[in-house]
Amino acid sequence: MQVFKDYLQQHSPITEEQFQFLKKELKVKTYPKGTMVLHEGGTTQVFCFVCSGLLRAYTLDNQGKEHTLQFAPENWWIGDRNSIYFHEPAVFYIDALEDTEVVLITKHFLEEAQTICPDFRKYNERLLHNNIRHMQCRINQLLAATAEERYLDFIQLYPNLTLRISQIMIASYLGITPESLSRVRKALAKKNSY
Amino acid sequence: MNKLIENIVAKPIQPGMVGDGFRVFNYIPRGGISQQRISPFLMLDFNPTFDFGPSDHLRGVDVHPHKGFETVTIAYKGSVAHYDSAGNSGVIHPGDVQWMTAGKGILHKEFHEENFSKTGGPFEMVQLWVNLPKKDKEVAPHYQALTTDDIGQVALANKGGIVRVIAGSTQDVSGPAKTYTPINLFDIRLNPAGVFQTSIPSNHHTALLVIEGNIIVNGQSASQHSFVLFKNEGEEINMQADETSIVLLLSGEPIPEPIVSYGPFVMNTEAEIREAIMDFNLGKFGYLE
């Protein structure tokens, strides 16, 4: 909970009093590595804020192949808006790639926080626009960027995940095969190695 | 004056797996033994005798990076094959020690050696990480493959056993390992009632791990798989074996610099860690299939 409180206070000047009032809406939960946090077709009413560990959102195609939409390491949010805001079945899976501690955040918490703290409203809007901006970039990357450009963008966004997850998962996020990812890394090494 | 003992730590309760080939108990860093407290040593994992059974699949750890320190692998039982991004490869057999200086960055992988893997059998290893001082963190990666023949030997009195001097010196025998800061690393093999006495400067951070058997060290009993941490007071270490015993003694002059660790990178600042991660991501450590 302290990690989330520090995060909030860093990004929007929420007071101690306001946090104490809002805290009743929050719940801390831990997911051991390998736990399925959300199933496709399931329902959820909460976002997860990751205090420690690593979550991943992904879909499975008809051949059973995984397509990773997002990783959520420390200080990231992850959730299925289709389910939270539109009360429809979740469209992707979320699982824990490491032992993970999260704060569960309800829509009601976000509404209350915006009511009592105008700065939080501004921050939440910025977060939403940042999310949309990121999605636009990601669509463009998947349509137009080379494998190397996608990888270079990935290591800027998630610098330490190359040490925490498999090449297969990185490839599934980039929309390329693991063999293509190997070729990209080999070419970079040829160009950059000491 | 006898070196004073600060603490005798029992074997941790749970082992952890490093890849699928190393079933290790972690002694450093742990509890009161922080990386600063035991500097220049950063990590000690011990895989006590364990038989993984015969396997066509090569157990081990796939490609991973290191930067800013050295890894020292001491093979007691079983054999490990290793490969790196500089094109080096080799096999570490029982009695051998591999001293790898990661320096400015290397990729490597290590697996049970193919023939050993096929037959299975007892496997026992120690991996020790040794920090590099700031001025040497960017040295080019290199290896010292120390085989049994290279390692200095001291025969103990009254057929008490032998001491294999890997690094540093005792009783006028020096070890072959070239180290960046003063370090002693002794593989001590004691026969029942065998006695070994040595003197280690009081400013060295000093510890020993009882790999096999039971010993009395400076008047205190240290049982199999326990870890003895010495205070920085006194110089003399006297040990006597109750039974056939193997002891790994390590000591080193502390490096008086900040330590910032992130997984396989050990630097002096957070900014250097971020740079190390990005260098790895951009392929600066080279490439290894």
Image: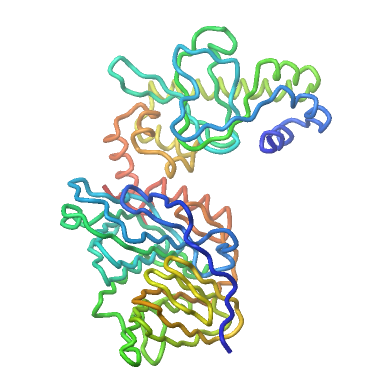
Above or below: residue B258 compared with residue B167? above
Quarter assignment of residue B6? bottom right
Q: Residue furthest right?
A: A17
Quarter assignment of residue B255? bottom right
Residue positioned 47% across, 27% down in the render: A70
Residue positioned 34% across, 68% down in the render: B74
Q: Is residue B276 left or right of residue B155?
A: right
Above or below: residue A34 compared with residue A60? below
Residue A93 image point, x, y percent:
45, 20
Residue B208 image point, x, y percent:
47, 73
Judging depth in this view, the residue of B13 and A136 nearest the camera is B13
Placement of the N terminus of chain A among the 4 image quadrants: top right
The colour scheme of the drawn protein is rainbow
Judging depth in this view, the residue of A121 and B37 nearest the camera is B37
Q: Is residue B213 left or right of residue A56?
A: left
Above or below: residue A166 compared with residue B243? above
Residue B273 image point, x, y percent:
52, 53
Tag count in the figure?
Answer: 0
Placement of the C terminus of chain A among the 4 image quadrants: bottom left
Residue B274 image point, x, y percent:
52, 50
Q: Is residue A122 left or right of residue B211?
A: right
Judging depth in this view, the residue of A98 and B3 nearest the camera is B3
Residue positioned 35% across, 80% down in the render: B190
